[in-house]
Amino acid sequence: MSSPLHARGLAALAAGLAKREFSSVELTRHLLGRLEAAQPQLNAMISITGEAALAAAARADGAIAGGKAGPLTGLPIVHKDIFCTEGVRTSCGSRMLDNFVSPYDATVVAKLKAAGTVMLGKTNMDEFAMGSSNETSWYGPVKNPWNTAMVPGGSSGGSAAAVAARLAPAATATDTGGSIRQPAALSGVTGLKPTYGRVSRYGMIAFASSLDQAGVIAASAEDCALLLGAMAGFDPRDSTSVDAPVPDYVAGLAAPTKGLRVGIVKEFFDQGLDAQNEQQLRATFEVFRKLGATLVDVSLPNVGLSVPTYYVVAPAECSSNLARFDGVRFGHRCENPQDLLDLYRRSRGEGFGAEVKRRIMTGTYVLSAGYYDAYYLKAQQVRQLISADFARVFERVDVLAGPTSPTPAFALGAKTADPVTMYLNDIYTIGANLAGVPALSVPCGFVNDLPVGLQLIGPHFSEAKLLAAAHAFQRETDWHTRTPGAWQ
Amino acid sequence: MNWETVIGLEIHAQLATKSKIFSGSATAYGAAPNAQANLVDLGYPGVLPVLNGEAVRMAVSFGLAVNAQVAPRSVFARKNYFYPDLPKGYQISQYELPVVGRGSLEIVLEDGTRKRIGITRAHLEEDAGKSLHEGVAGASAIDLNRAGTPLIEIVSEPDMRSAKEAVAYMKKVHTLVRYLGICDGNMQEGSFRCDANVSVRPKGSDKFGTRAEIKNLNSFRFVEKAINFEVARQIDLLESGGKVVQETRLYDPDKGETRSMRSKEEANDYRYFPDPDLLPLEIDGAFLDAVRATLPELPDAKAARFAHEYGLSEYDAGVLTASRELAAYYEEVVRRLGGEPKLAANWVSGDLAAFLNRDNLEIDASRVGPAQLAGLVGRIADQTISGKIAKDVFEAMWVSGRDADAIIAEKGLRQITDTGAIERAIDEVMARNPGQLAEYRAGKDKLFGFFVGQTMKATQGKANPAQLNELLRKKLTGP
């Protein structure tokens, strides 16, 4: 009766490895085969590191045989190509870093390596994580496994698609304005963006430092809990990581949903939301009610300003963060520069794609003398208001529930011509980044045969509560177990 | 027209931490290019800065030493500009909220008057690397050893009115940072350097003139020369009907002139904004108290104590406290002598200083240690040798490294205090020079000096000068 290895989640695979039902090498070889096979159709990966993966799997099998295995030993995962991986190309989806082999591991990568996980490869992503459709990648768009004419969402489109197509049981990802939750929703998987500071940013190539946060994408909340536990924690190399104990997220999954106060955000149900999507969500809320939760109507009056606020703050930080890509020490360097200015202009002009350039330009503009107060400073003030809205509402409710994305996956190319339409995809997700609070997306149904997601948002450091609520929901429903026909 | 000069200085002092301000790389000077640049210093993708607590402690100690307000909360900002020796494309500095706020210190002018110079602020920042434009054909080379070295930039009020005042202020800050042990003060290696903002205005005017900023002055002499040149240039310009333009200028020490580097219009827009990778720097009272407890006796306090405790003039006290090491040397001499503070002061700031200067040595490298100098001064005090002979003994000590007593004994330099011996010498001199004796007795008083010299010569300079004077006067006058 045993299901194929790729159909099992992390927790089930861990149990199988422990019982010696299969080896990590067998599991790794199986998934590598699927990754390679899927690549022409999905383009989920930028690098597949088969040889190193098999070596790591063999080491993991040794550890298991020697009784030295931890809960994650031998479990294959994929990393978003934004995380630096020693000795492996770390492109960040950009031509700029196509030739960049990182000399070091990001803290997230090092921790998961130390926990015994096996890296299968690096996932495709929007260039420098700037995008909501994975179409800005230098390596070409990722296709949605549910319908390859559709986008998988972005920027962690490769991570979401790889998990959705069961090419890997779990993936790391990052979320600056929705880059974990939106592709998780559009690809029908579970994605968690932790509290800002919960997971180290060291070695994660910066897009917007005050918003970037590493998290996980997996098939279930349970698997997210398992992986997050190994990633989270204070890192002395990241001053913005928070020195607070990491709870046992897996043990926390058992927390009861009875009495949970779920806030339904009024502003998330206005004209932008797809009608069928709304219907699915309303049905979802009933599941929570059945589980003993109380539904409370709440308001985040300033959350409507999230998108314009974000598109000042994030580009401002990105314009500075991306200044280091100058062709001098690493990354793309133009041929035969005539002088310093020519080196800068052509290296950056050739190395960056259009969306990255647009955001660098926007960010440079909003930080310029004479505009700083009107844009950057104002945006920071609005950010405070939005954070205050969240703080206020969390005095009344435990979590907020609403849509992750206004619509299901859209067609490749449908929104590339108009950046603002694209930006509006993140209208429900950006608030959590601005406030630094954790949020996750779980599959909650289908619209036009495409998955849609439920977003749960909690106060700072409430990951355990969010995961427990999502886990309870996933025990009542089977949306998260559904896999696209071609990838079963 | 009479013109008044207005000067403000921005001093960059490199903090003497072992590691860089935001990374664990060493800060030692003179390593092979890029040997002290790690991934953080190189601005690699994904790396993050972590603030060096020791750099904070040092900046705070400076703030306390100039009686400044130390900010309970200060913020690191990014100063954005492209340059190959600036790996991240931005410098981490403090902009709107610096760690050290308003303070002041006092300088002493040549005529002895004191003047208070306001300090606007002092902030922490990282240094850039170095671009080397020689040695690599068709390219520039980059050395990032210095990138990320901690600096404090100390910004003064425009309170100085002459190049001399500016130099006195800069020297005062130099003394202070070395006392605090927060900067080695080495100007040749660039550890202590300044930018000077210079303008002129009609005397009596309360409006500032347009200023020029002279960049990167790394010696006291250059500061003085560059400012004087710049003042003359601006006055010439204004008196010939021209206008000073706000610009950045460079001083060329070979030509002794400043020249334009870039005008205000060409100036960068640095697009400062708070660095999201670093939390605001928060300093509480307990931290301030802890730093305050470690502060050494500061130069002004030490000079006041020297003047009071050792009965020194304000000037001498100032000279002897110019560095902590010199002051310690002096106090050690006095301690060993058990007194004679004035005599000791004369020797430390006189002969010893002259020899150190001649051989270009720091006090710590003196060839005559404090115990040895105390040995010599003690022999003057107990009249074993005269001050004049002592100068010869000191030179012999400097050359040989031997003690004063050994040299005095070996060369037979012990002073003659035996009245009989001195009288015999006087008698011989008088007998040999009857003509001069007659002239003296006839009223030519000036010849007294001649007889002193001759008698000293006869005793090989060893006669006790006071005794000799007294006996000679008696004998010359006649029975």
Image: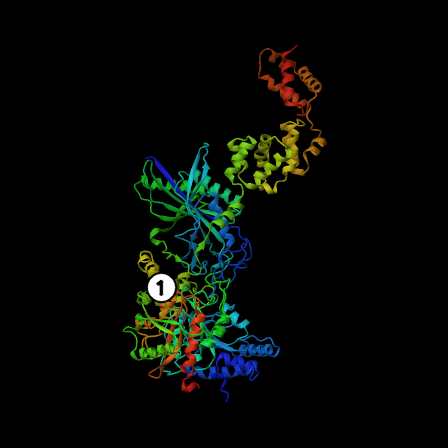
**Which residue is more in the foreground, B410 or A52?**
A52
**Which residue is more in the foreground, A267 or B70?**
A267
Task: State the quadrant of the C terminus of chain B.
Answer: top right
Query: Is residue A62 rendered to the left or right of residue B148?
Result: right
**Total numbered labels:** 1
Task: State the quadrant of the N terminus of chain B.
Answer: top left
Residue B22 in view (yes/no)? yes
- Place residue A483 in its image quadrant: bottom left
Q: Does residue B202 lie above or below A448 as drawn?
A: above
Give x and y (percent) for residue B14.
Answer: 49, 50
Q: Does residue A255 lie above or below A20 as drawn?
A: above
Q: Does residue B441 lie above or below A2 as drawn?
A: above
Give x and y (percent) for residue A224.
Answer: 46, 75
The coloring applied to the image is rainbow
What residue sits right under mark 1 in the picture? A392
Q: Amino acid at mark 1?
A: Arg
Give x and y (percent) for residue A176.
Answer: 40, 68
Name the element at disc 1: helix
**Which residue is more in the foreground, A419 or B413?**
A419
Give x and y (percent) for residue B21.
Answer: 49, 55
Furthest residue toward bottom: A1
Furthest residue toward left: A271
Q: Residues within 10 Å of mark 1 (few under 14, many from 20)?
A: few
Residue B190 in view (yes/no)? no
Please, which chain is the residue tagged with disc 1 on? A
Q: Residue at x 43, y 71 (%)?
A: A465
Q: Does residue A131 lie above or below B385 as drawn?
A: below
